[in-house]
Amino acid sequence: MKSRLLCLILAGLCSVAHAQALWRGVPAGSSPAEVGQRIEEATPARPSTLSEEPRALLEIPRFEIADTDFAVRFLFERERLVNVVLRADTASPGDAQALADRIYASLRSRYGLELSGKSRGVPLSSPLDRRWLFRRTTVHLQVVDERSVLLTYGV
């Protein structure tokens, strides 16, 4: 009896680990159709994003986070979801840094200490570039090109 219960628990844990959610409850490895069922506002991506792997097959043109519009792209390799990338372009480097700071505070409260940065003994770099590892998901916050904020969820 105990061995059966242990097997059931282990099987349940394995299925949970395999279906790690990336963003808004969408599991890594989902097909484009499965992502579309879970996130109704996701639409087919522009053809220009289909050139190389991972390919952005689905996107949400505008999704608000921290009072800012982000473009969301769902990246697939061999028709399986591997990354969700959120990008906000701001008016100035100061706006990008302020937005990244707000998102950083939220991510740090949710995921704890980041893998990179002062908390791990590495000097803080500017522009912002921080990573967290939560279960099997990597969360990566960056300021790129001085005016853009990228938030990437991946496996």
Image: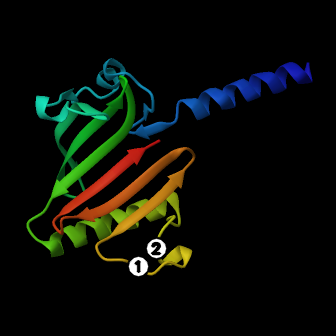
Residue type at the position of mark 2: Gly
Q: Is residue 131 left or right of residue 73?
A: right
Residue ID for mark 2: 117
Position in image of residue 125 (x %, y %): 36, 77
Q: Is residue 58 left or right of residue 78?
A: left
Disc 1 crowd, CA 10 A, few/some/many (<14, 14-19, 20+): some
In which quadrant is the N terminus drawn? top right
On the question of residue 63 being in view, the answer is yes
**Viewer-closest of 74 and 67:** 74
- The coloring applied to the image is rainbow
Q: Residue at x 12, y 63 (%)?
A: 90
Residue type at the position of mark 1: Leu
**Do residues under tags 2 and 1 come within 8 Å of each other at their CB atoms?**
yes
Question: Which mark, by number, is residue 124?
Answer: 1
Q: Residue at x 38, y 31 (%)?
A: 81
Q: Residue at x 32, y 18 (%)?
A: 33
Disc 2 crowd, CA 10 A, few/some/many (<14, 14-19, 20+): some
Question: Which mark, by number, is residue 19?
Answer: none
Q: Say what secondary structure mark 1 lies in.
A: loop
| Image height of 128 relative to 23, above or below | below
Position in image of residue 85 (x %, y %): 29, 45
Q: Is residue 144 left or right of residue 125?
A: left
Q: Say what secondary structure mark 2 lies in.
A: loop
On the question of residue 68 being in view, the answer is no
Position in image of residue 38 (x %, y %): 34, 25
Q: How many marks?
A: 2
| Image height of 86 relative to 97, above or below | above
Mark 2 vs mark 1, CA separation in Å? 5 Å
Q: Sequence order check: which comes first, mark 2 or mark 1?
A: 2
